[in-house]
Amino acid sequence: MWRLHLCLLVALAEPFLNSKKTYEYKYEGLVRVGRELPDLVESALKMRCTFKIIGESPQTFVLQISNVDVEDFNGLPGKGVFSPSQKLTKRLSAEFSQPIVFEFSKGQITDIRTAPGVSNTVVNIVRGILGFLQVTVKTTQSFYELVELGIHGVCQSSYTVEEDSNAKELIVSQMVDITNCQQPAALYRGMALAPEDKLSKQRGESVVSTVKHTYTVKSTADGGLITKAFAQERQYFTPFNVKGGSSRLLALRDIELLKVSDTTDKIVTGQMQSRGNLIYKTEKDLRPIPVVMINLNEPMPKILDLIKHLAQANIYHVDSASSTDILNLIQLLRVATLENLEQLWKQVSGNDEHRRWFLDLVVEVTDERILKFLETRFKAGDITANEAGQALVVAFNHLSAEPVSVALAQEFLTIPFSKSHPLMWNTVVLAYGSLVYRYCVYTDPCPITVVQPLLDMATSGLSKNSEEDMVLALKALGNAAHPSSIKTLLKFLPGYTAGAEKLPIRVQSAAVQSFRLLASRDPHSVQDIVLNLFVQRTLPAEIRMLACMVLLETKPSIALISVISEVLLEETDLQVASFSYSLLKGISKSRTPDNQHLSTACNIAIKILTPKLGHLSYRYSKNVHLDWFHDDFLFGTSADIYMLQNESLIPTKLMLKGKMHFIGRILQFLEFGFRADGLKELLVGKIPQLKKGITDFATIMNILSDWQNLPKDRPLLTAYARVFGQEAFLMDVREDSIQSIIKSFSPSAGKESKVWEKIQDVQKGTSWHWTKPHLVYEARFIQPTCLGLPVEISKYYSIINAITVKAKAEINPPPKEHLGELLSSDISLHTDGFVGVTKDHFVFHGINTELFQCGTELKSKIVSALPWAFDLKINRKEQKYEMNLTPIKTVTELFSVNSNVFSVLRNIEDPSLFKITPMMPETEDSQKGLPLARILPTSRHDQVQQQCADAKIYGTSVCIEAEAKRAHYLHEYPLYYFLGHTRFSYQLEPAEGAKPIEKIQIQVTAGRKNPPRVSEMMNLNATPESVITVKALGLSPPAKPLGYEGVAFYLPTAQRDNIEMIVSDIGEEANWKMCANANTDKSQTSAKAHLRWGAECQTYDLSMRVSAACQPESKPSIYTKINWGALPSVFTMIEYVPGISYIMGFYQKYEKNPERQAAVTVVVSSPQTFDMRVKIPERTIYKKAIPSPIDLAGFEAVNFTIST
């Protein structure tokens, strides 16, 4: 009987609304963001209301919301109460008062319609309310899983059903997996260039979310009636690993049925528009920036006011107080129309300062408006090539990668102005490639039409045999990393296309490197291509080395690593062998998650290859790889240096690359590279001229003097830079550029020179000011909550760079015909100014809408500033130079770091009630300070410490000030270490207790005259032929000067070359001196140095002797001996030698060696290796066959000298 009863119950449990009934519910929604700890501040928002669901037809219903009440909270949990938010309540009540229509059938909401003026935020809250109806109750199962539509997207749900037969109710529990939705409502912005690292996510997550719904479904004659619906959603976020502490968001939604009644009156709804289904909808332009909230009505005058304010505030210094206004300005620019932007341009373009601020920040309008604005500028030609290039590279890289934006961006490839300057054309093409890459990240499959202009450019360059065009197109294709470009790239690779081997090496190299980003998008195709290049021994070494580099970026299997090993065991080209071996060796020691499996395979390969290749020196091509990773922080960094060499003395190609590993993603932050094709061509065939190896500087300079004879179309040097993995800068240094610079600075240059023009300006008095505000990155993750409110995790990083220079010179006599006349003139120069930078970093976690914000913010600010003011006198003829500086009179901060975490509440209706409270409030406990050195392991404390180094002679102190307030133990919860206030500063202050100093004077005199007092201090058996004297004085007339004087001179004799130096304290009773001398014999086989200091140079002493032996019957060697007498404690570093040598793999044995002496012997054991033996008191340390960084072949023919 009970089974029959249950079947009847569940059969009537499918959620159902009767179109002839009115259902009245009460609703309460709560969101809370903080740490859920009693001593840390949190923010919360609560909304209550009642709502009615009124039937219009069997599938159409009207939602009426009333009695809206909004309250907020900002304080310590349990120690405060919610406060009414009256103006926000009024604003929401006005929008909620309009009826909302929705379609509902079989437990599914299919369409929501509202009046046209209802905001997107309110519609999403409605989705959160109506979401309680979106539940699937199966009548035959107590546990089941479904993929279904909800506010979070199309996601998987797990249901459990329990029956209460007495109450005729079902208790339905639903767990929603919102991390793996088939069609997620969550949105990422600004992360396209930081690909996910799945192996890192296995070690921990930075964001974890859970969603649980509980429904009480009562059986009625019509079907299931939901009488209660409770939802709980939690999100844990940390910049590190959530297991190490996290910021927590809790969202609760509680709905309860009040009554059901017959519908008496129909609701008049008026004009309605469809707003879609129950899936949360994000604003297309992501308008609200989470860390600021300003009124966006009438943006034009507000934009102008902010531009004027920022420009004025940053002229004479970097105004750190106004730096956050950059985000306010960006927010306003993003709501301006295209017509507004054009009007603003007309108003600011005539003022250099305002024009620059506008152009630097208008590029953060990240949709088609900025492209249309810049297109107008390009076609009108009313901006310079420099302005255009800077604006376009940022605009393209920050642009929202939508189809309409990509189509508009293509137009810039055809505008004549884009080609008006080579550097700007490079920027346009490379930036377009970057845009294509980001577009393809979110578009699968990615249409070939977006990359077609670059494919055509590459093909055209090949048909014209234009090296410059081919390289640029290939690099842009590398940026785009479009799979359809592979067919075109193969046309430039030897072995795939006939005649490709005849292309310049630079072109082939660019083609190989174009596969670097494709390595992660289509690893198998890339592996086949670059492995085929690597195994072809007839190809140039550079191509094979780059192919190996790309191959390893595809994260090959252990089988492919075995293939590489087999090839290297038979390799005859030592450049290829050395480079490939070093690549494998670097990865074998890697600790970052992305190399987790690859490092194991490389470890095996290294054990096989070391006996053959482990001895190769640094004269061969190398990769140096360094990295670290911390699981608790989920953070790490890695750095690579690639040196590709051939027969020349310098690397043919040099690359430096840095990566950051954080929150499960990899960001290739910066990469710089240089090619020396022209230098290589210059040196080919001329290496044998270097009879004395790399020390034959005269021959090297003679070789380099032929650079003017290089082909005009061949660059001497090529430089490039990648930012976030995308090549953004490409420049060739050619013969004509160098010639132009040399002519401008030549002593024979006359009035036609630009340098001449600048000198005339300085004599009249000149000033120059430049600022560069820049939003470095904006990364946003937005995910709906069960309330329909968006929880957002955002990171912003902005910079303001500024420099101001004022200068005025007097030149007597002034130059009349050419620059060389300056060499016989007296020059007096006064200059003052400053250079500075402010960096603001924000992290936000919480609810962010255009109406209100509730969350947690980390704010950090780094300020660097260097002001100056000094006079400089130059007498080139007599070689006298003098600088006068005014000592500082007030505290001058050179560097500072400030950071804190705040709990914030903002609502647009009442800016006066914005609440921004430090998460760690001031309490009695927080004032109980502990020494700053114990910050890491201690609990909550607040301590300010200052340490100063006084230079009273100069009236100045250098001070470091630090303050920190912390809540919990760092080793338990890494995140907690960032919850408190941090301040660090490095500053100059007037020295306490010092006599007033009028000025600080630095004098430099060079010449052959015997300086005063030299004969008193040292024994002169030779006449000084070259002397330099430096004085650093503090002047406060009528008192005598105080300070230091240093004298250095060269004393040659028939047998030895001597250099001597004395530094002495200037003062009536001062006797501190430092005396140093070094000499080498004329045969250059030995050198020695002696250093003494203290009272009359007698307190401490240290000496060193180096000798080289190159006898035919023995191996070349270098012998070094260091002796010391009394030494300050800071010099007792000898005790660290055993430990350091052990780490470096040296052997040790205990021996009774001379006291106060260290002896080092280096013996050449082969052209690539040397042996080393170190003797110190009580111990001898040694190691054999150490790889040499330079080639030791021919060492016997060189009298190698080390002098100290």
Image (cartoon, grey):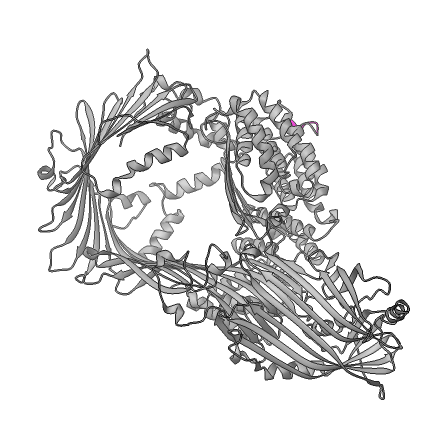
Q: Dividing the picture into quarters, in which one does residue 1147 lie?
A: top left
Front residue (pair 795, 24): 24
Image quadrant occupied by the C terminus: top left
Q: Is residue 434 left or right of residue 170?
A: left
Q: Is residue 131 part of the magenta span, yes or no?
A: no
Horizontal relation, residue 702 to residue 413: left or right: left
- Count of picture labels: 0
Horizontal and vertical percent position of residue 870: 27, 57
Q: Residue 31 in the image: state x and y as whole percent.
A: 62, 72
In the depicted view, which residue is nearer to us: 679 or 174?
Answer: 174
Q: Residue furthest top?
A: 1113
Residue that protrudes farthest toward the front in the picture: 1
Q: Is residue 935 left or right of residue 622?
A: left
Instruction: Look at the image and tell me in which quarter the N terminus lies.
Output: bottom right
**Residue in the picture at 30% in, 37% down:** 1135
* Residue nearer the viewer, 119 or 252: 252
- Give the vertical position of 34 relative to 1089 (above or below): below
Residue 329 visible in the displayed image: no
**Quarter-of-image position of residue 695:** top left
Q: For residue 283, which quarter of the picture?
A: bottom right
The magenta-colored residue range is: 497-502
Q: Nearer the viewer, residue 1079 or 861?
A: 861
The spot of residue 433 in percent (x, y) is 64, 48
Evaluate whether residue 421 shows in this view.
yes
Instruction: Tell me residue 809's x, y (percent).
Output: 29, 55
Q: Is residue 1122 left or right of residue 791?
A: left
Compared with 1119, 854 (above or below) is below
